[in-house]
């Protein structure tokens, strides 16, 4: 049986997963865009045109072939992917990876959180994520399919880092004393999810680096690397933030994983933001015309 991977809501992170899987996999990926579908096909991925509430025949056909599935679609009023799959046959499916978020843990007051920490979401965003995790777990149990809950820290990588934000004038230094966040380089994200899929791993995994730090530290380091002046520091004022930003800053935790290395055999290539940002600049230099 050829392993067949279905990526629902295929984007930046999922593309890194497919790259990490390597040869030997047949890959389906959903998109709502015919233009992106054409790009998928050129890259050797079979496109599936689908969006929530739209025709489901193409998704049903791919789901019937899939042995492994990841979903990158965030929940809204429920999980739209789960709602669509409930009525679809998945006779070959062996593993589901739900790309979730650390918001399921809630606020830890800056303390450490790992996979053994019980979820205690305090935000609506976190509650929605935990409800979706549990619903996917229930679907897996009903169908005899292993489910991994992949709780992903802030994603960065080529094209999506503080380096580009500085260059484009989008960087900020919002100062909230004591606030820290973890991150994960997209390449390491892809490697971890691919390893989880190949092992058919189950349960929660924290996908995070080993260097939780204030967000302004990352901007400062990117500024040092590029020679671009950092933006001015701005005192934290929740009233000036979007609802999403307020939600992020309402929780303060230090993430670590006690499962990724021992159980999946993955050692991070970029264990902190310094290594990740340096690699982004090095890759740009390698691609520069002589």
Image (cartoon, rainbow, N blue to C red):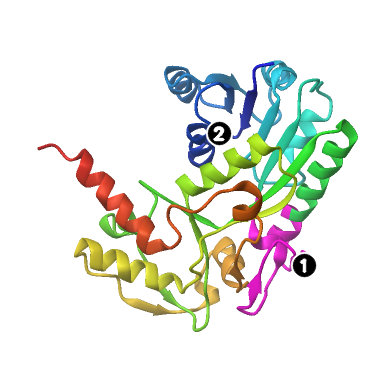
Disc 1 target residue:
120
For mark 1, does the 10 Å Cα neighbourhood hold few (<14), some (14 to 19), or many (20 or more) residues?
some
Name the residue at 90% across, 35% down: 142
Residue at horizontal 58 percent and vertical 26 percent from the top: 29
Coordinates of residue 271 in the picture (x, y in percent) = 45, 60
Mark 1 to mark 2 CA distance (whole Å): 29 Å
Q: Is residue 121 visible?
A: yes
**Which quadrant of the view contains residue 73?**
top right
Residue 149 percent across, percent down from the top left: 71, 49
The quadrant in which residue 88 appears is top right
- Residue 173 seen by the camera: no
Is residue 167 found inside the magenta-colored segment of the image? no
**Residue 259, image x, y percentages:** 66, 56
Left or right: where does residue 250 sit relative to residue 282?
Answer: right
Residue at the image point whose x is 17% and y is 40% from the top = 288
Image: magenta residue range: 100-129
Most extreme residue toward the left is: 290
What residue did someone put label 2 on? 10
> Considering the numbered disc 1 on the image, is that residue within a helix, a strand or a loop?
loop
Task: Residue 120: say if magenta.
Answer: yes
Kindly identify the residue that appears in the image at 86 percent across and 31 percent down: 143
Q: Is residue 189 above or below residue 170?
A: above
The secondary element bearing badge 2 is classed as loop
The number of callouts visible is 2
Q: CB under 8 Å between callouts 1 and 2?
A: no
Observer-nearest residue: 123 or 90?
Answer: 90
Q: Could you tell me which quadrant the N terminus lies in?
A: top right
């Amino acid at each position: 049986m050829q392993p067949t991977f279905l990526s629902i809501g295929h984007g930046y992170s999922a593309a890194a997963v497919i790259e990490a899987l390597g040869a030997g996999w047949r890959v389906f990926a959903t998109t709502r865009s015919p233009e992106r579908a054409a790009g998928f096909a050129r890259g050797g991925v079979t496109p599936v045109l689908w969006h929530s509430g739209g025709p489901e025949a193409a998704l049903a056909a791919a789901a019937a072939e899939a042995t492994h599935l990841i979903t990158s679609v965030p929940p809204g009023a429920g999980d739209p992917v789960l709602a669509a799959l409930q009525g679809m046959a998945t006779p070959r499916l062996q593993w589901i990876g739900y790309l979730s978020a650390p918001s399921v843990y809630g606020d830890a007051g800056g303390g450490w959180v790992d996979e053994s920490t019980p979820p205690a979401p305090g935000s609506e965003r976190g509650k929605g994520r935990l409800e979706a995790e549990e619903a996917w777990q229930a679907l897996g149990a009903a169908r005899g399919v292993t489910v991994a809950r992949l709780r992903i820290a802030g994603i960065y990588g080529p094209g999506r880092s503080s380096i580009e934000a500085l260059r484009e004038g989008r960087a900020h230094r919002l100062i909230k004393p004591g606030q820290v966040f973890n991150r994960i380089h997209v390449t390491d994200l892809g490697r971890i999810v691919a390893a989880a899929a190949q092992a058919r791993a189950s349960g929660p995994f924290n996908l995070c680096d080993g260097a939780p730090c204030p967000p302004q530290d990352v901007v400062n380091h990117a500024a040092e690397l590029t020679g671009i002046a950092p933006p001015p520091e701005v005192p934290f004022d929740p009233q000036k933030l979007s609802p999403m930003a307020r939600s992020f800053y309402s929780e303060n935790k230090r993430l670590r994983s006690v499962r990724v290395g021992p159980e999946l055999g993955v050692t991070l290539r970029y264990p902190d933001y310094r290594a990740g940002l340096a690699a982004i600049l090095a890759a740009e230099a390698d691609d520069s015309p002589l």
